[in-house]
Image (cartoon, rainbow, N blue to C red):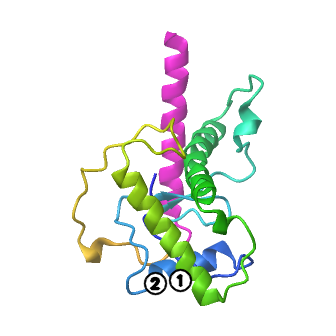
């Protein structure tokens, strides 16, 4: 669990989509290779490179406690999306647990705050890559990230807009996941 892109400096009230458009439009901005995607919350558009949950469906992990089971492909997709995003939220929790300066309101100038956030993320990544056992998160199983691929710069996604093709892809993915899950339940 490491940070791959950090863009501090935006106010907390800035719209998610606006921050994202800024991140992917910068010269050395967020790179999303074609065919890859980032999980995002419902505040973002479901478009090329950004896989958002379905709106109007159960989503949060608490919605699935007490024996509730998904009844549609969209509910199942949202349950799995929420589980995966929980890992992302956990990473932010670990960052704040490790660096007390990130837990409180800061009175430093904005430029200094941005540098502090970037430094904390870089140090977090360094610790994660160098320590065989991270004391802040002792129950985490490390994933092998050694299989990275070179990607051509021209194959990067450079805009974020709703996409019919991407929505259809998400719909098919949700149906395939749900069908597979139902089949595995019927075998057991």
Taking depth in this image into account, of 45 and 86 the one nearest to the observer is 86
Badges 2 and 1: C-beta atoms under 8 Å apart? Answer: yes
Tell me: residue 143, above or below residue 66: below
Q: Is residue 132 left or right of residue 161?
A: left
Residue 53 in the image: state x and y as whole percent.
62, 52
The prevailing secondary structure element of the residues shown in magenta is: helix
**Mark number displayed over residue 22:** 1
Q: Is residue 104 left or right of residue 156?
A: right
- Residue beneath disc 2: 25
Q: Is residue 14 left or right of residue 137?
A: right
Tell me: residue 159, above or below residue 62: below
Tell me: residue 69, above or below residue 34: above
Tell me: residue 57, above or below residue 48: above
Magenta span covers which residues? 161-188
Whether residue 160 is visible here, answered yes or no, is no
Taking depth in this image into account, of 11 and 171 the one nearest to the observer is 11
Residue 32 in the image: state x and y as whole percent.
39, 67
Residue 123 in the image: state x and y as whole percent.
45, 65
Q: Is residue 141 left or right of residue 61?
A: left
- Residue drawn at x 42%, y 41% is 133
- Residue drawn at x 52%, y 63% is 164
């Amino acid at each position: 669990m490491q940070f791959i892109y950090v863009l501090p400096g935006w106010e907390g009230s800035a719209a998610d989509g606006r921050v994202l458009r800024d991140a992917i439009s910068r010269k050395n901005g967020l790179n999303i290779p074609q065919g890859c995607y980032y999980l995002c919350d419902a505040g973002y558009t479901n478009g090329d490179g950004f896989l958002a949950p379905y709106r109007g469906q159960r989503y949060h992990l608490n919605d699935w406690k007490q024996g509730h089971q998904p009844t549609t492909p969209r509910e199942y997709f949202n349950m799995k999306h929420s589980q995966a995003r929980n890992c992302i939220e956990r990473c932010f929790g670990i960052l704040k647990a490790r660096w007390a300066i990130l837990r409180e309101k800061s009175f430093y100038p904005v430029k200094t705050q941005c540098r502090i956030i970037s430094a904390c993320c870089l140090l977090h990544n360094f610790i994660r890559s160098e320590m065989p056992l991270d004391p802040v998160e002792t129950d985490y199983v490390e994933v092998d990230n050694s299989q990275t691929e070179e990607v051509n710069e021209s194959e990067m996604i450079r805009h974020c807009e709703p996409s019919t093709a991407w929505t259809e892809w998400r719909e098919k993915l949700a149906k395939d996941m749900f069908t597979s899950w139902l089949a595995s339940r019927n075998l057991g």
